[in-house]
Amino acid sequence: MAIEMGDYFDFLGTSDLAPGVGLSAYIFIGIGVLVTIIAFFGCCAACTDNACMMYTFASLMAIILIAEVGVAIAAFVFKGEATVFVSDAMKNGLKNYGNDEYEGVKKGWDSIQEQFECCGVDGPDDWANSTELTPIRRTVPDSCCKNVATNCGQNKIDPPSPPDSAIYSDGCLDQFVQYVEDNIYLIGGAGIGIAVVQLIAVIAACCLGKRMKGDNDYV
C-alpha cells in the first residue's frame, strides 16, 4: 500500500476531511509488526510450557480482535460519508493538478481517469476550476482523452457547451465509488477470514494455557 498506492494517498490527502489518510499504510505496517511480535510471544509460550505467557498471548490477541471488530463496525456506520470524502478529495485535487508541489495529485488523477475512462468529478467541465489549467480554460488533462497523446486535451471543453467527443464525458466520482462498492465484499470476506483465524488462535491459546497450568499444578 505504501509503495503502490502512494499516489492515491497523496490524491486523497488533499481532502479537508481526512488530511492524514496517507499515514494509514504505515499504521497497517505497524500493526503487522505488532501482531508478529505477539505471535512470536505465543510461540515462546508454547515452547516453554508457560501458562502465564500463553494467557497473556491470548489476551493480546483478543484485544486486537476486538479492535478490528470495532473498526469494521465504524466503517459500516460511516460508509455513507465515504462518497463525501472522495468527492472532497477530487474537487480539491482539481485545483492542484499540474502543481509541482502536488505531483501525487496529478498521478492519482491521471491513473483514475485512464483506468475508469472518465473525466473530472462529475464531468469534463469540472476542469475549468483547475488553478493550473485556468489560463487555458478549454483544456482538460491528456488522461481524459480516449486516445492519449501529448496535448490531446487542449481546447476540448467550452462550458456550458457539450464536451468534445474525443474525451470521456462521464465523471469519475460515480465510477470510483462503484468500483469500491463492487470490491467491498471481497475485502470484507478477507477480513472475516482473518478474524476467524485470530479467534481460533485465542481459543486454542486459552485451551493450551489451561492444560499447561494443570500439568504444572500436577507436577
Image (tube, rainbow, N blue to C red):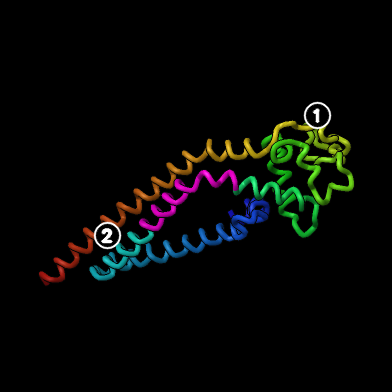
Kindly indicate whether the residue at mark 1 contacts the one at mark 2 (C-beta within 8 angstroms). Answer: no
Q: Residue 61: x and y, percent?
A: 34, 60
Foreground: 52 or 119?
A: 119
Q: Amino acid at mark 1?
A: Pro
Residue 6 can be seen in this image: no
Report the side of 175 relative to 219 (left or right).
Answer: right
Report the side of 211 relative to 114 (left or right).
Answer: left
Extent of the magenta region = 65-84
- Residue at position x 58%, y 43% from top? 83
Q: Residue 198: x and y, percent?
A: 35, 54
Q: Residue 177: x and y, percent?
A: 59, 39
Q: Amino acid at mark 2?
A: Ala
Residue 187 is marked as none
Residue most toward the front?
160
Q: Main secondary structure of the magenta part?
A: helix
Specify the quadrant that holds the C terminus. bottom left
- Residue at position x 24%, y 68% from top? 49
Task: Give the alpha-carbon distance from disc 2 to disc 1, as whole Å.
Answer: 65 Å
Residue 162 is marked as 1
Please tell me whether residue 153 belongs to the stretch shown in magenta: no
Q: Is residue 95 above or below residue 55?
A: above
Q: Residues within 10 Å of mark 2 (few under 14, many from 20)?
A: many
Residue 205 is marked as 2
Q: Earlier in the sequence, mark 2 or mark 1?
A: 1
User: In the structure shown, which secondary structural element does the residue marked by tag 2 occupy?
Assistant: helix
